[in-house]
Image (cartoon, rainbow, N blue to C red):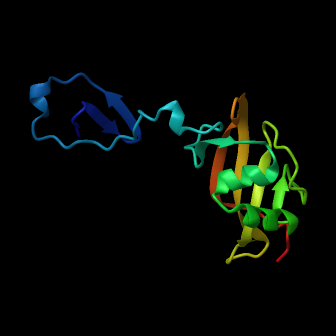
């Protein structure tokens, strides 16, 4: 069976052949996986990325300010999350709003237990890729995941 791109399939082998364009009339177009996935669409592990890259402008690198900018929540909401033990930095629960985020920090915000299995929790995860000091404060580049699934560290 010959396809549009001159492919002849033999069992599981595909052999490419040169075919003149005029002989392709009336042929079926084969299904091809896209090879045009750019490096922007691939994550560090070679899989399609499931995060968003964001650039935040903040006056400081404090945890409460960072969460306010990254999540879009109000300052009072982020303070309640931090003081309530719903925020982890690098796998450790932090209750200090004054912690300064560093490069390669991983910040998890606990949303709630997974409905299907309470041993897991849904979180929002932010990873600090880099930051630059500017005249007006900091430009912080982050990776952001919504509805990330992890082990339930709160137990409820």
| Residue 30 at x, y percent in the picture | 28, 42
Vertical arrangement, residue 141 with respect to residue 144, above or below: above
> What quarter of the picture does the C terminus occupy?
bottom right
- Dividing the image into 4 quarters, which one contains the N terminus? top left
In the drawing, does residue 132 fall left or right of residue 15? right
Q: Residue furthest front?
A: 136
Q: Residue at x 72, y 33 (%)?
A: 131
- Residue 17, by quadrant, is top left
Residue in view at x 88 percent, y 51 percent: 98
Q: Where is residue 14 drawn, in percent x and y?
A: 36, 34
Kindly indicate the quadrant of the structure image that contains residue 78.
bottom right
Percent across and percent down for residue 109 are 75, 60
- Asked which quadrant contains residue 97, the reply is bottom right
User: How many numbered dots are placed on residues in this image?
Assistant: 0
Residue 129 is situated, as x and y percent measured from the top left of the image, at: 71, 36
For image coordinates 76% across by 69% down, the residue present is: 120
Q: Which of 147 and 16 is in front in this view?
A: 147
- In this image, 32 relative to 25: left or right? right
Please tell me which residue is depicted at 58% across the width and 49% down the height of the picture. 50
Q: Nearer the viewer, residue 9 or 147?
A: 147
In this rendering, the answer to whether 25 lies above or below 87 is above
């Amino acid at each position: 069976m010959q396809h549009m791109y001159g492919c002849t399939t033999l069992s599981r082998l595909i052999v490419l052949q040169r075919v003149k364009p005029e002989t392709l009339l009336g042929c079926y177009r084969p299904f091809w996986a896209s090879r045009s996935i750019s490096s922007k669409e691939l994550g560090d592990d070679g899989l399609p990325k499931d995060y968003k890259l964001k650039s935040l402008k903040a006056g400081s690198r404090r945890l409460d300010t960072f969460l306010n900018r990254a999540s879009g929540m109000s300052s009072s909401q982020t303070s309640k999350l931090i003081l309530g033990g719903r925020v982890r930095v690098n796998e450790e629960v932090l209750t200090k709003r004054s912690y300064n985020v560093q490069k390669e920090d991983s910040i998890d915000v606990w949303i709630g237990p997974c409905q299907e299995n309470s041993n897991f929790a849904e979180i929002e995860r932010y990873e600090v890729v880099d930051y630059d000091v500017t005249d007006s404060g900091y430009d912080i580049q982050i990776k952001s995941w919504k509805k990330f699934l992890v082990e339930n560290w709160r137990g409820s």
